Amino acid sequence: MAELVDDAVPSGPGDRPVTGAPEQVVVADPPPEPDYPRYRVEPGEPARLAERDPDETERYARKKDVAGELATARKRIADLQARLYAEHRRSVLIVLQAMDTGGKDGTIKGVFQGVNPQGCQVWSFKAPSAEERDHDFLWRYHQRVPPVGMIHIFNRSHYEDVLVVRVKSLVPEAVWWKRYEAINDFERQLTAGGVTLVKFFLQISREEQRRRLQARLDDPSKHWKFSSNDLAERARWEDYQLAFEEALTRCSTPYAPWYVVPANVKWFRNLVVARTIADTLAAMDPQYPAAEADLDRVTIPA
Ligand code: ATP
Ligand code: MG
């Protein structure tokens, strides 16, 4: 709540009351502290997925409650992305993981509106091709790492190689077990080369997944999104939770943190992702390159 305060004491130059009478000024509430520690998996600590609430919406009740904040975050992302692109020195890699129907596509659509498509690219990873399988598991991801100036979004990522691969025993345990360390090394190496990583797990509940899958069945225009494989994966829900718990716990690092985003409510999910990306870009503080000298003396000849 904003409060009314008697402010008889001028607090600085230009702040003097015009008359001698004490002035009533409105002191606005300070902006709310971003609630990141709650969503970030602290490096070295367990992710504790079972203790997190996918229905969380903080103090917001309706979509329209977040409209202003979401628009601001999107604008910040667009402005900072323009600077990152012009600066041409560093890049950003955003990793999105979720259970089926978790909302990876919707998040991309909802958060990156307004970003110049030239500076932002989405890469979706499905089951690897024969050629990809013939290389080390990181090979195909390394090729899609953003070059300087770019933001790349991984829609699924190298984490599949310790998620689906682990759950379905696609390689022996001795092989996937070593991958957590390989992933941390890979991400450390990227960071050292000027790539900033942000990783999001969009957390939905089992019941919410049931509703979303049912909605796909009930609406013919969504049938193309339904795959009976989704049901086979859903049957392994608990195995996936364990695999996510392990991946997030072992691979949330100070240089490449994981965020667990409450994702049952789509507009809140978008808000959390948007503001986290905006703040990450702001912390990088990308700068426009210096202009050529004496531009003010230049006029364009007719
Ligand atoms: P949609 O939201 O449109 O369903 P999606 O990301 O689920 O998008 P799908 O084509 O349905 O896309 O599924 C991709 C599949 O590829 C997933 O089942 C995923 O587990 C699988 N996959 C991704 N990476 C790997 C990998 N490294 N090894 C094995 N399977 C993988
Ligand atoms: Mg799918």
Image (cartoon, rainbow, N blue to C red):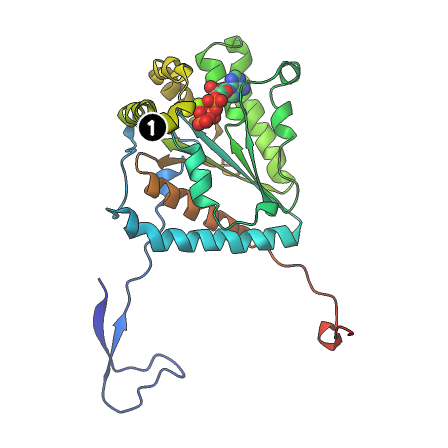
Q: Is residue 247 visible?
A: no
What residue occupies the far front of the structure in this picture? 220
Quarter of the rendering occupied by the C terminus: bottom right
What residue occupies the far right of the structure in this picture? 301
Q: Position of residue 123 (x, y in %)?
A: 56, 32
Please name the residue shown 42% across and 38% down the image: 107
Q: Is residue 43 left or right of residue 153?
A: left
Up/down of 39 relative to 22, above or below: above
Q: Position of residue 42 (x, y in %)?
A: 41, 36
The image shows a total of numbered marks equal to 1
Q: Position of residue 91 (x, y in %)?
A: 61, 44
Residue wearing tag 1: 49
Task: Say which of 200 and 17 sits in front.
Answer: 200
Up/down of 12 relative to 146, above or below: below
Please name the residue shown 34% across and 46% down the image: 35
Which amino acid, by three-letter code, is at mark 1? Leu
Q: Is residue 273 visible?
A: yes
Q: Is residue 96 left or right of residue 269?
A: right
Up/down of 109 relative to 71, above or below: above
Task: Say which of 126 and 134 sits in front.
Answer: 126
Disc 1: CA contacts within 10 A as few (<14), some (14-19) or many (>=20): some
